Image (cartoon, helix red, strand yellow):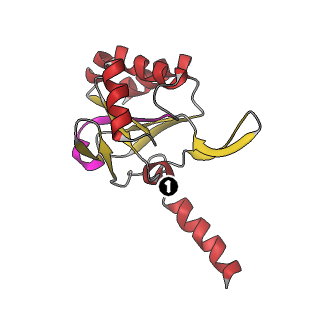
Amino acid sequence: MYILSIPILQQELTMSTVQLDQAVPNFQLPSTGDTTFNLSDYLGKNIIIYFYPKDNTPGCTLEGQNFRDNIAAFQAHDTVIFGISRDSVRVHENFKAKQAFPFELLSDAEESACALFDVLHLKKNYGREYMGIVRSTFLIDKAGVLRQEWRKVKVKEHLAEVLEAVKAL
């Protein structure tokens, strides 16, 4: 019985992750600004969701700054941006204020969105293994359909790719 249930569980898990050219299931997360994010509230707009490992680290700060510094270009294409990590809303509020981010940061402490977007993977750092967020970005169109995904993002060249994809919608 246990042997049979393992493949079924894996199949259900696979089926419950986002797929290109498919509608993204609605999800909710606590957000900065003392609100709750609901994906369905943003139907009618393009949505950039970027997952990052941790607030106040060099790569994550630079990634957020790149989106911040180009917010007008995204807004010109009717696109909203949200950052997601496992940090608490309180930590997010401090990070957002310190960096003057004009977009909300979402807290996924329970890892539900991380599972939905399949961004938690085994990582290694100085010989230590742990489950961590792999830097990833997702573009969802105005109808709520996942149109593009970038996984294992390299921060420096990433923003231009995302902006080009938004312009192409």
Q: Position of residue 157 (x, y in %)?
A: 55, 17
Let me know if residue 40 is in the magenta part: yes
| Magenta stretch, residue numbers | 39-52
* Image position of 43 (left or right of 13): left
* Image position of 141 (left or right of 154): left
- Which of 95/48 is in front? 95
- Please name the residue shown 67% across and 81% down the image: 2
- Which of 130/73 is in front? 130
- Which of 23/5 is in front? 5
Let me know if residue 51 is in the magenta part: yes
Q: Is residue 81 visible?
A: no
Q: Position of residue 149 (x, y in %)?
A: 50, 37
- Please name the residue shown 59% across and 42% down the image: 132
The quarter of the picture where residue 146 lies is top left
Q: Is residue 53 visible?
A: yes
Depicted 77 relative to depicted 129: above or below: above
- Quadrant into which the C terminus falls: top left
Residue hosting label 1: 17
Depicted 121 relative to depicted 45: above or below: below
- Quadrant into which the N terminus falls: bottom right
